[in-house]
Every structure is written in structure tokens, then in C-alpha cells.
Image (spheres, rainbow, N blue to C red):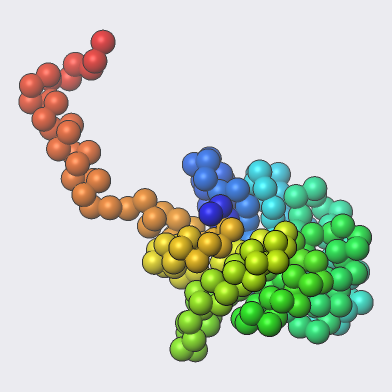
Amino acid sequence: MRLFLDTANIDHIRHGVEMGIVSGVTTNPSLVSKEGKVNYQKLVKEICSIVPGPVSTEVLSQNTQGMISEAREIAKWADNIVVKIPASIEGVKATSVLNRENIKVNFTLCFSVNQALLGAAAGAAFISPFVGRLDDIGEDGMKVVFDIVQFLRYYQLPTQVIAASMRHTQHCIMAAKAGAHIATIPYKVLLQMIQHPLTDIGIKRFAQDWQEVMGDGRVA
Ligand code: E4P
């Protein structure tokens, strides 16, 4: 399972990429807004230059023609751009058109297997089931991820599943078990994934034991 960062924060993206484990980024209008009143195109282009893989950025239009026009414009910004199109009727239509033009689509705001079926049929490169938001309303978000992965595998479709709306580290484990191709996670969750108190204790103890016998000396 590949890891993407779900943020538009440049410092966080740089850190994740420097760690060598972040191979893509997903943004959305809310995440971009968190960065203040920025030049949207400039910000996305900068993210694209930092990240080695796909960078998803979302259209704001709600009608098909608007989505298509926006997507065509956004697609020119960088080679690794992926356009996020919402899982609506208008979005399905836009995805079909953009797919024929070889513009990569991330079919977003996906909350059901049926929506994913239509997104895959329209040729979306990625489908993003929103796990946390489904959990919030008492549904099983990860079951939706699992079911989508199953049908894509069964029909050997090239569409990849991005487990999105990930809220905590348990979601990461569950997404990996469900067979998601990618998990897009908040920076905070990325940092939490490596945390373990026994690792901290172990590092400290090794250093102390060495110091007691060897002093400051290092292995030659
Ligand atoms: C995914 O592409 C979305 O940007 C994101 O995961 C939404 O997450 P949220 O439900 O925490 O806003």
C-alpha cells in the first residue's frame, strides 16, 4: 500500500517526501483553504514539483461542462496532476470525457460501491472512498474500501483505490488489510504511525548500556 499525504501544507509535504515514503498528495478545497488565501495554481504547482507521484486537486464546478473546462486547465499545470471529480451524475459524465482525453481523474467523495462501479466504468484512474466520514454516520467505511478493491480485482480493472478520510493509525492498518492500493493520510497520522514507546525506551537503553562500558567510543 502506497502512502499519500492528505494536505496542502508545503512543509508537511516536504517532510513526508524527504522521509522517502510519501509518493503522492491529495488536496481538496477545504485543505487548500486551511493554508490561507493563497494563489491556488502556484501552490499546486509547487506541490507537484516536490512530490514524486500523483497530486490530486479538485474542481469546484458542479456541472459537467464546468468540471471538464476546469479539469482541462488544471491538467496543464504539471505532468503529475490528477483532477478530483465528485461522484455525482455530472461527475461520471465529466470523468468519461476526461478519460477519453487521457486526463487522470480521482473520483472523489465516494461513499458507496455503486458510486465506485460507475467511476471505474467511466475510466477513473483513482477512486477515493471516504472512510472517516462514513464511520462518522455509523456506517462501516472500511467495508466499502474492501468491497471496491474486490470488484476491481475480480474484473481486473486498472482503477486504484485511495482509502481517504483517514482519521487515525488503526485506519492505516485496516486499509492495508482491505487491500487498498493507496492510503491518503493527514500529516499527524503519518507521524503517529512510527511512534512506539518501546522503541523510544529501547533506543535509550542501548545508548546507556553502551555508554557505561564503552564510554563515548564508537565502533572503529
Ligand atoms: C481525500 O482525498 C480527501 O481530501 C480527504 O481524505 C477528506 O478527509 P476528511 O473527511 O477528513 O475531510
169 with respect to 150 (left or right)? left
Q: Could you say where residue 7 lies in the image, as x and y percent from the top left?
A: 58, 61
On-image quarter of the C terminus: top left
| Nearer to the camera, 98 or 31 | 98
Q: Is 131 situated above or below 105?
A: below
Residue ID at (52%, 45%): 21
Residue ID at (37%, 51%): 194
Query: Which residue is situated farthest in the left direction here?
Result: 212
Residue ID at (86%, 64%): 99
Q: Could you say where residue 121 lies in the image, as x and y percent from the top left?
A: 79, 72
160 with respect to 1 (left or right)? right
Query: Which residue is situated farthest in the top direction here?
Result: 220
Query: Which residue is situated farthest in the bottom direction here?
Result: 137
* Residue 74 appearing in the image: yes
Q: Is 2 situated above or below 36?
A: above
Query: Which residue is situated farthest in the front direction here?
Result: 154
Q: Is 218 situated above or below 179?
A: above
Residue ID at (63%, 82%): 112
| Nearer to the camera, 21 or 161 | 161
* Residue 73 appearing in the image: no
Q: Could you say where residue 200 lies in the image, as x and y percent from the top left?
A: 23, 46
6 with respect to 124 (left or right)? left
Image quarter for residue 52?
Answer: top right
| Nearer to the camera, 66 or 90 | 90
Marker count (numbered): 0
Q: Could you say where residue 45 lies in the image, as x and y percent from the top left?
A: 75, 51
